[in-house]
Image (spheres, rainbow, N blue to C red):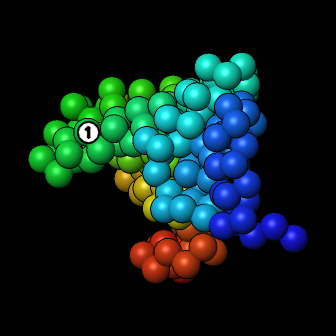
Amino acid sequence: PIDSANAYQAFVNLSNQGNAQGFYGLGQCYQRGLGVVASDSMACVYYQQALTAGYAEAGDMLKRIQNNAEIKQNLMLANACLERESYAEAIPYYNRAIELGSDSCSYELGICYLKNNDVKALKQLKKAAEQGNKEAMYQLGEMYQYAKLVNADESSAIAWYQQAAGLGHSAAKKEASK
């Protein structure tokens, strides 16, 4: 079996011969930290060389790295808005991250909508709950219990609290046991 260091060296040898697969392999090593310290910027250098040498899949990897960087940037900007409690300002950044493929910020976006009394909160919190987010489940329970942007519905509130409680949410456990 080939270990990471040997794979890295094999790709270096291939790339020294101008081999497109060697450049692509080096991009993979740098992107994943195989035999080297992980570095998206170095991965991009080698993916670009692979693309220039005719390895079309390298273009997809470049786009993926750029996409992930844009997601990270939007999440960072959204989080900076939250630190200032500027929930309305955070919404476009979270929306952009979701458009780019992030599935990790539905809860935060839902909270931003909730803080701005926007009914879009329900959709985002349900999406986050479907992804297993116990905080979103708890928030949905509160929304139904206290008629926040929805009609009061005790059975829906209890159902959401029970789901959150089942995932270990302590406040939801108290609400579900009332």
Quarter in which the N terminus is drawn: bottom right
Left-right relation of 83 to 159: left
| Residue 37 vertical placement versus 13 (above, below) | below
| Residue 160 vertical placement versus 47 (above, below) | below
Q: Residue furthest front?
A: 17
Name the residue: 81% across, 67% down: 2
Tell me the quarter of the picture where residue 168 sits. Answer: bottom right
Report the front residue among 59 and 148: 59
Left-right relation of 79 to 164: left
Report the front residue among 16 and 11: 16
Report the front residue among 161 and 7: 7
Please state the horizontal and vertical placement of residue 81, each as a whole percent of the image.
19, 41
Location of mark 1 (residue)? 77
Q: Residue furthest left?
A: 84
| Residue 17 vertical placement versus 131 (above, below) | above
| Residue 37 vertical placement versus 124 (above, below) | below
Specify whether residue 69 is in view: yes
Mark 1 lies on a secondary structure that is helix
Name the residue: 38% across, 47% down: 108
Please state the horizontal and vertical placement of residue 136, each as a whole percent of the image.
48, 55
Specify whether residue 98 is in view: no
Name the residue: 20% across, 45% down: 80
